[in-house]
Image (tube, grey):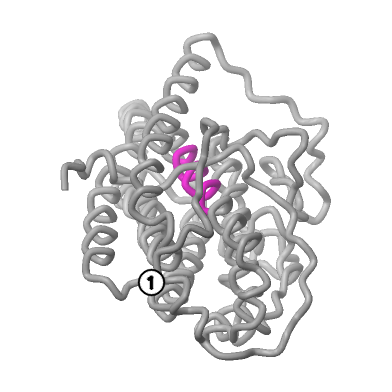
Amino acid sequence: MAISLSSMVFGVSATPSACLEAKGLKHLNSQSFSFYVALQRPSSRIHHRYPHRIQATVLQENEEKIAVEESFQPKSSPENGGDNGNQPEPSSNGLEKLVIKLEQSINVFLTDSVIKILDTLYHDRHYARFFVLETIARVPYFAFMSVLHMYESFGWWRRADYLKVHFAESWNEMHHLLIMEELGGNAWWFDRFLAQHIAVFYYFMTVFMYLLSPRMAYHFSECVESHAFETYDKFIKAEGEELKKLPAPKVAVKYYTEGDLYLFDEFQTARVPNSRRPKIENLYDVFLNIRDDEAEHCKTMKACQTHGSLRSPHSYSEDDDQSCILSEADCEGIVDCIKKSVKDPK
């Protein structure tokens, strides 16, 4: 197939609607799994098209927002709203603005181009497409952690909140992947081969991008999550009534409703812990919650683009042991880390 891996590496794109509000649902009794098979067959019922360029952080006026809190600002708590309206935007000179525009334009071009390829391969094979997306979606988070752990080894970085949140994000995406596997999205050898090889290439690309510009890497991940949200949202609206008739996969019920949900709360940095507890009664509920997870990832990635702004939702607990807090080494990108290590060897 004459498609270069460098063109397919991201396998995702973003659209202007990063946050849409979930529609009200009516729970129906579970029936047979016959619809699973129907979704795997080629059909002309759904054909995703994305005619607009990506604007991962902008919502059109006529679009609905998902019912979640806005990302809180640096040094603020999601409980008190963070005084969002009074904090000034970080100043930037003309050169920095130009660099930001260039970074985002590159991200837009890459994701906007690859979606055409995915539409051709997976426009009528939904579970296979979701499997590919979720295989790729995990990659940025453990790529971020790899770089941050390397910085820790040199004494350049010690910010536990970033590592906790990124691990929780990868944990969430892993369960999305397990759900798609249970639904049969990985049945074809070609889909597994494509997704896994794209993921390996994407990992090294993300590491390189994160070393040079964390801001650019986080923006690209925002585009990825925005596209994932849009993909699931369109699928739910098109197939919602059929999905309500199907039972939820066991792995989804266990992840969303059972056991310790600390990690489930941890990746949702715009929410107070324990404020979101999904109910899983059918397959519609599962996809609804996966879609909402992607919206939360998108907002977290948006917050990360302002250096130092990310805080774990659990960091604001009154029960935190303040005596164990260590001094936080900090730098932004490998160039900044090297400069600071030279100026201040300590």
Vertical placement of residue 249 versus 144, above or below: below
Which residue is identified by label 1? 185
Q: Nearer the viewer, residue 333 or 169?
A: 169
Q: Residue at x 59, y 69 (%)?
A: 287
Q: Residue at x 64, y 42 (%)?
A: 17
Q: Nearer the viewer, residue 45 or 309?
A: 45
Looking at the picture, how far across and down is residue 322, in whole percent? Answer: 64, 62
Is residue 219 found inside the magenta-colored segment of the image?
A: yes
Looking at the picture, how far across and down is residue 7, in whole percent? Answer: 27, 39
Tag 1: amino acid: Gly
**Residue lying furthest top:** 94
Is residue 280 found inside the magenta-colored segment of the image?
A: no
Looking at the picture, how far across and down is residue 325, in whole percent? Answer: 56, 58
Near mark 1 (Cα within 10 A), the count class, few <14, some 14-19 or many ≥20, is many
Q: Residue at x 50, y 85 (%)?
A: 34
Magenta part mainly helix, strand or loop?
Answer: helix
Vertical placement of residue 108 versus 225, above or below: above
As helix, strand or loop, the secondary structure at mark 1 comes to: loop
Looking at the picture, how far across and down is residue 170, in whole percent? Answer: 44, 63
Q: Quadrant of residue 261?
A: bottom right
Q: Residue at x 59, y 49 (%)?
A: 300
Q: Is residue 264 left or right of residue 203?
A: right
- For the C terminus, the image quarter is top left
Vertical placement of residue 99 versus 49, above or below: above
Magenta residue span: 218-228
Q: Nearer the viewer, residue 283 or 224?
A: 283
